[in-house]
Image (cartoon, grey):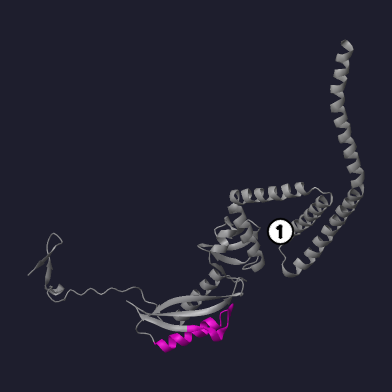
Amino acid sequence: MQNNKIDSVKNELAKPIEAITTKLDTWMEMLVEMIPNMLLSIILFIIFIVLARLVRKLFIKVFQKSSDNKALQNLFATIIHYSMIGIGLFIILDLLNLDKAVTSLLAGVGVIGLALGFAFQDIAANFVSGVILAFRKPFLIDDVVQVGDLMGIVNRTNLRVTVIRTYQGQEVYVPNKDVLSNAITNYSILGERRIDLAVGVSYGEDLHKVHDLVLETLKNLEGVIRHEDMIFTYKEFGDSSINFEIKFWIKFPDNPSFLEMRSKAIMAVKDAFDKDGITIPFPIRTLDFGIKGGQKLSEMNIGPNNSLSSK
């Protein structure tokens, strides 16, 4: 009776042991069959690593001919490098008959990409805008620009923000998507800038003389360029003066700067007017008490309490 129990236990243990042994034998056979594919996979992996490095170097050489943006260059070079390695890994997995693993990886990458896209949409928008700005190049480092209401000098840029140093001495970090969505005024790209100067002269002055004197003064001022493009126009009959505008060009942003050159022009015009006796009048107000229905000043008496009383 006891021997029958022992035999029964042995039979029960033999079944799982046999199943494990069979499974191990199957795995060994599969391993032996896959050895050629594994060796080929290792060779392919090495080839793709070398190929990824070569493609990276080739991309950098081509990219440097079209842009000098190091951040963008390194980013794209890294993406291309790991993309080549990723393609190699998918080919190797398929070669090893791991189709389910390839499908799972692709599905996982898609889900992760979708989740990251929603979570970091602002970062993605700034990144894409940075890429566009790097290729379009609306400004360079040290250019004087105005983005929306912000004006200053471009200090540095990356794929997330553009750093502008204002004339008040602050560094403002502007997200690239805001830079791209606003009007960009680049004062440095042409190397020239026009100054519009408004002046007024007395009604008693010779306007032809004023015209010739102002043009001659500014043409002789150091830093003024494009003399033939100066524009002098009388604008209006003002309250106490005849107003005109003089528009002239200077080199920009090279010294002298815009503000300094405008100041020099104002001083030069004032000195020329003083030398020739031309008057820039103060505001004048004429008080007329003889209006219809009123009382003339000569007919009024000032009372003892500083009040006006009629005769």
Q: Looking at the figure, which quarter contains the C terminus?
A: bottom left
Q: Residue furthest top?
A: 1
Q: Does residue 166 appear in this view?
A: no
- Residue 146 image-quadrant placement: bottom right
Magenta segment's dominant SS is helix
Would residue 173 be found to the left or right of residue 58 on screen?
A: left
Amino acid at the residue labelled 1: Ala
Question: Residue at left 88%, top 39%?
Answer: 26
Asked if residue 4 is among those painted magenta in the image, a careful observer would answer: no
* In this view, 132 is above or below 116: below
**Percent from the top left, x then y, of residue 161?**
61, 56
- Residue 1 image-quadrant placement: top right
Residue placed under numbered mark 1 in the picture: 71
Q: Residue furthest bottom?
A: 208
- Residue 296 image-quadrant placement: bottom left
**Percent from the top left, x then y, of residue 222?**
59, 78
**Percent from the top left, x then y, of residue 22?**
88, 34
Q: Nearer the viewer, residue 274 or 190?
A: 190
Would residue 304 be found to the left or right of residue 20 on screen?
A: left
Asked if residue 223 is among those painted magenta in the image, a careful observer would answer: yes
Q: Nearer the viewer, residue 235 or 180?
A: 180
Q: Secondary structure at mark 1?
A: helix
Q: Nearer the viewer, residue 205 or 2?
A: 2
Question: Residue at left 78%, top 53%?
Answer: 86
Q: Count the marks: how many?
A: 1
* In this view, 17 is above or below 128: above
> How would you rate the neighbour count of disc 1 (Cα within 10 Å): few for under 14, some for 14-19, many for 20 or more?
some
**Percent from the top left, x then y, of residue 10?**
88, 20
Question: Residue at left 89%, top 13%?
Answer: 3
Q: Does residue 54 appear in this view?
A: yes
In this picture, which residue range is highlighted in magenta? 206-231
* In this view, 3 is above or below 146: above
